[in-house]
């Protein structure tokens, strides 16, 4: 995208370089060239109209559209916890076994993250407030299969399970990461904001496909080529994938930057949505190997902070190992890991 005339890359298995396609010929009257676009850092949002995909303080759109479901879910969980017979079983740590959440902001759990992203898309479709469309995303104009779509393809909202199956198929086949799923949701909401578009039954598959395509190229060092997606979706052409990517980028105004604070916001909002819908993230027992890695990381960070404190002229803090009480050393207990 460094070339001022570039918009996307046309993938080809025979070449090892990216072919740049000029877009000046595709500009309509009254539009400006890509070279005249403002730099991303110079673009400002209107007051009171913050973009949730860029502003870490703005609420995510999917949280707003699932607000009622989240409130009802929290009330339901609270009432269930008050009834002993309906209280869910919870793994508890003991002297021999320690359970840890298997999902963190830096290494999310893939299966549960994809489920949560699919659920966020479900609420986007279910609680949309208008029917704004763009032709490139319409599945009747650009079908993903040779069979096309039914006459009522735009009438019925897809279920969460259907959305999850579609996203999971792409992620498993392309071997994408959980972080890529979160970036996918960020790009999807940025598209809805910038293009003033609504995700609905007629276009949700192509919007999600475009967001995944772009997120995989931005996030992963070894990106999946457009032609590879054609091996997953057998009936779609490389030309269609290229055009989808090109228009998606144009609608995003080529703004593919995702600040770490925004990424973290989306991760924790997805966890909130998961908790309200009983999509709990699994707790896994702490193994000896993982415990040793955590201990090593703790020691590295402790040494780092100690070195910085000494460098800044501060006295190194005393640990519990050096604290004495009446001349008696503090008692130490050794953790036993199974």
Image (tube, rainbow, N blue to C red):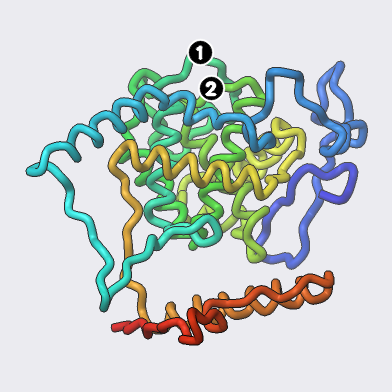
Kindly identify which numbered label has been placed on residue 243.
none
Residue plotted at (37% across, 22% down)? 68
Farthest-out residue, left? 85
Which mark, residue 130? 1
- Reply above or below: 69 against 103: above
Give the residue furthest to the top.
Answer: 130
What percent of the width, then of the height, locates residue 53? 64, 36
Badge 2: residue crowd in 10 Å (few <14, some 14–19, many ≥20) = many
- Tell whether label 1 touches label 2 (CB within 8 Å): yes
Height in image: 89 above or below 198?
below
Q: Earlier in the sequence, mark 2 or mark 1?
A: 1
Residue in the picture at 78% in, 70% down:
314
Q: Secondary structure at mark 1?
A: loop
Q: Which residue is mark 2?
A: 198
Residue 219 is left or right of residue 137, and the answer is right
- Left or right: residue 118 compared with residue 3: left
């Amino acid at each position: 995208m460094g070339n001022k005339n570039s918009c996307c890359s046309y993938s080809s298995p025979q070449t090892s370089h990216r072919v740049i396609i000029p877009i000046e010929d595709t500009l309509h009257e009254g539009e400006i060239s890509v070279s005249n676009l403002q730099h991303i850092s110079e673009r400002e949002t209107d007051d009171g109209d913050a973009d949730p995909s860029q502003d870490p303080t703005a609420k995510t759109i999917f949280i707003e559209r699932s607000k009622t479901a989240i409130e009802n879910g929290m009330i339901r969980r609270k009432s269930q916890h008050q009834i002993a017979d309906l209280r869910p079983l919870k793994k508890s740590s003991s002297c021999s076994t320690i359970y840890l959440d298997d999902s963190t902001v830096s290494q999310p759990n893939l299966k549960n993250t994809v489920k949560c992203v699919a659920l966020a898309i479900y609420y986007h479709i279910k609680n949309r407030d208008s029917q704004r469309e763009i032709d490139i995303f319409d599945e009747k104009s650009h079908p993903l299969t040779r069979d096309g779509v039914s006459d009522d393809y735009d009438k019925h909202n897809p279920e969460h399970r259907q959305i999850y199956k579609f996203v999971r198929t792409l992620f498993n086949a392309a071997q994408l990461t959980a972080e890529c799923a979160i970036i996918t949701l960020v790009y999807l909401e940025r598209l809805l904001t910038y293009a003033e578009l609504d995700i609905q039954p007629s276009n949700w598959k192509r919007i999600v496909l475009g967001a995944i395509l772009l997120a995989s190229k931005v996030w992963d060092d070894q990106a999946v080529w457009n032609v590879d997606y054609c091996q997953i979706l057998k009936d779609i052409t490389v030309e269609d994938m290229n055009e989808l990517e090109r228009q998606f980028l144009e609608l995003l105004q080529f703004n593919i930057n995702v600040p770490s604070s925004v990424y973290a916001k989306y991760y924790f909002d997805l966890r909130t949505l998961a908790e309200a819908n009983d999509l709990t993230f699994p707790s896994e027992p702490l193994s000896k190997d993982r415990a040793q890695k955590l201990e090593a990381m703790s020691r590295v960070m402790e040494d780092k902070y100690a070195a910085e404190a000494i460098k800044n002229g501060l006295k190194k803090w005393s640990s519990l190992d050096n604290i004495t009480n009446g001349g008696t050393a503090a008692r130490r207990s050794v953790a036993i890991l199974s």
